[in-house]
Image (cartoon, grey):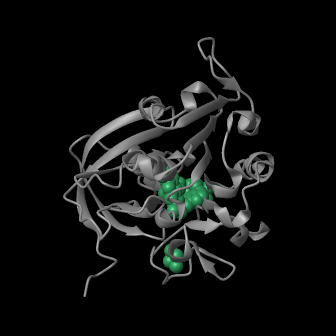
Amino acid sequence: MKNLYLPFKVKVTKIEKHSSNVKLFRLERNFTKNEDGLVFTPGQFVLVSLFGYGESPFGPASSPYQDSYIDVIVRRVGTVTEAMHRLKQGDEIFMRGPYGNGFPLKFIEGKDMVLVTGGCGIPPIAALIEYIVANRDKFGRVHLIYGARTPADLLIKDKLKEWGKDIKVLLTVDKPTKDWSGHVGMVSELIDDIKIDSKNAVAAMCGPGPMMDALERILRPLGISDRRIFVSMERKMQCGIGKCQHCAVGDKYVCQDGPVFYFDQIDKSWD
Ligand SMILES: Cc1cc2nc3c(=O)[nH]c(=O)nc-3n(C[C@H](O)[C@H](O)[C@H](O)COP(=O)(O)OP(=O)(O)OC[C@H]3O[C@@H](n4cnc5c(N)ncnc54)[C@H](O)[C@@H]3O)c2cc1C
Ligand code: FES
């Protein structure tokens, strides 16, 4: 029987600094594809471990069709992520997974999409966009709404430009620099730029925090029902496979029942 706890070795082959406290790490090995031809379902997570420091969950940000590497985008906040930020190209670390449910790819096919995220919430949404772009004819109008504090805090800028050829990319910042020509203000102020058929639209968010504001001011006014809003949630984790109860919220385990939930599965106890 396959041991779900067993980590495997990955080689760090690329490190990019994306903002003052965020780096992208390319983790290489020959990954196995599932029956849908994907290495992971966008929205699933992997557990990355560094000997002597511990293990942390990250949502892969690269294309799920790519089987020679997974990119993770890591914000430096504590023990594991600080150790990751000290890694050098060529270092070897460990990974296990993918775990969790991911976004419901079959359900979202054929629909218009509104993807809302902010700051460091972009990774699972990025992987979902890579999937959508690779299957562009299966989706209707797709909008990404992405907000950050300053232009320097917007991550994966090269991708944002590339995706602009296939989907509508709407960016906003709180504090502009002199050369910023995009929107300034809340993500919710971009609502007039979104043209969708609300009866056939689905939304995906990485939240909660400020994203809940986007829910009230964008998704509800657009008429997207709660059962068509999917939210990727973050919680502290240990086993990653529903055994240790570390990630429990109410009667749900984020690692196993999520990390992607219907919006109406999330209540105030999640904050
Ligand atoms: C499903 C999932 C996907 C994630 N994807 C990403 C990602 O793509 N990129 C990324 O940068 N981070 C992501 N995270 C968050 C990331 O796992 C944590 O930031 C990381 O585990 C912190 O580890 P640490 O040892 O550096 O921090 P610690 O030393 O453990 O803690 C530092 C601080 O961060 C807080 N913290 C730790 N873990 C979490 C967590 N899971 N959620 C919220 N707060 C936490 C602690 O309470 C503490 O205040 C994800 C989390 C989950 C559950
Ligand atoms: S992390 Fe152990 S039950 Fe979810």
Which residue is more in the foreground, 7 or 161?
161
Picture coordinates of residue 7 (x, y %)?
A: 29, 69
The N terminus: image quadrant = bottom left
Q: Is residue 108 left or right of residue 48?
A: right
As drawn, 38 above or below 1: above
Question: What's the residue at 29%, 71% (across, down)?
Answer: 35
Question: What's the residue at 59%, 12% (across, down)?
Answer: 179
Which residue is more in the foreground, 243 or 118?
118
Picture coordinates of residue 177 (x, y %)?
A: 63, 16
Quarter holding residue 53: bottom left
Picture coordinates of residue 91 (x, y %)?
A: 23, 48
Total tally of numbered discs in the picture: 0
As drawn, 244 above or below 141: below
Point out the residue furthest to the top here.
Answer: 178
Residue 9 in view in this figure: yes
The C terminus: image quadrant = bottom right
Question: What's the residue at 35%, 55% (across, down)?
Answer: 64
Picture coordinates of residue 167 (x, y %)?
A: 51, 38
Q: Is residue 137 left or right of residue 169?
A: left
Question: What's the residue at 48%, 84% (across, down)?
Answer: 243
Quarter holding residue 203: bottom right
Residue 271 in view in this figure: no
Which residue is more in the foreground, 119 or 187?
187
